[in-house]
Image: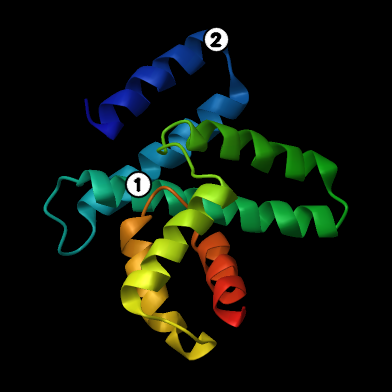
């Protein structure tokens, strides 16, 4: 079942349950899918990889907004963003823990022969491909820096 079909099913359920947060989030995902499918150069269908990237982008946008709302002391808006993040993350693959990411990065560093912060580009390239959808880029970057400085 494609992401779009899952979203439509969840949307019906959320409407029947009168779940405002769910409806907001699901409609945002549906809109993003439609935009991606009708974008210039798009084939009209999304690959699973493209779907995951799109969902990660939606979560990142909401996390950025959440951070801003918390800094500006706007708890009502921050709460909405948190609710939407929770709904969108249900459709993403399970995220790896920091320890799991660290273990994978150590393997990648050993495989690429990286030894200093100057080799960060090599490691990040391999890591983002290997951990796509399973880990946040910001987390990967922070751990790579930490491991290469040692």
Query: CA gap, disc 2 to disc 1?
Result: 26 Å
Find numbered disc 1 in the image and state the secondary structure of the residue it sits on: helix
Residue depth check, mark 2 versus mark 1: number of the one nearer the observer: 1
**Residue 39 lies in what quarter of the image?**
bottom left
Mark 1 or mark 2, which is nearer the start of the sequence? Answer: 2
Viewport quadrant of the C terminus:
bottom right
Residue found at the very far left of the displayed protein: 43
148, 58: nearer the viewer: 148
Q: Position of residue 138 (x, y in %)?
A: 56, 64
Vertical arrangement, residue 121 with respect to residue 62, above or below: below
- Tell me how the rendering is colored: rainbow
- Residue on which disc 2 sits: 17
For disc 1, the neighbor class at 10 Å (few under 14, some 14 to 19, many from 20) is some
Q: Residue at x 21, y 25 (%)?
A: 1
Q: Residue at x 22, y 49 (%)?
A: 37
139, 66: nearer the viewer: 139
Q: Position of residue 70 (x, y in %)?
A: 81, 53
For disc 2, the neighbor class at 10 Å (few under 14, some 14 to 19, many from 20) is few
- Residue on which disc 1 sits: 52
Q: Is residue 39 left or right of residue 142?
A: left
């Amino acid at each position: 079942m494609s992401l779009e079909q899952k979203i439509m099913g969840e949307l019906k359920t959320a409407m029947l349950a009168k779940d405002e947060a769910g409806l907001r989030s699901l409609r945002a995902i549906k809109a993003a899918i439609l935009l991606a499918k009708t974008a210039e150069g798009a084939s009209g269908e999304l690959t699973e990889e493209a779907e995951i990237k799109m969902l990660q982008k939606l979560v990142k946008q909401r996390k950025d907004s959440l951070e801003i709302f918390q800094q500006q002391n706007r708890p009502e808006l921050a709460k909405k963003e948190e609710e939407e993040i929770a709904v969108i993350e249900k459709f993403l693959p399970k995220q790896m823990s920091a320890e799991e990411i660290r273990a994978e990065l150590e393997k990648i560093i050993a495989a690429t022969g990286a030894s200093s912060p100057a080799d960060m580009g090599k490691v990040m390239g391999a890591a983002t491909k290997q951990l796509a959808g399973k880990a946040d880029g910001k987390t990967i970057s922070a751990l790579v820096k930490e491991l290469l400085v040692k």
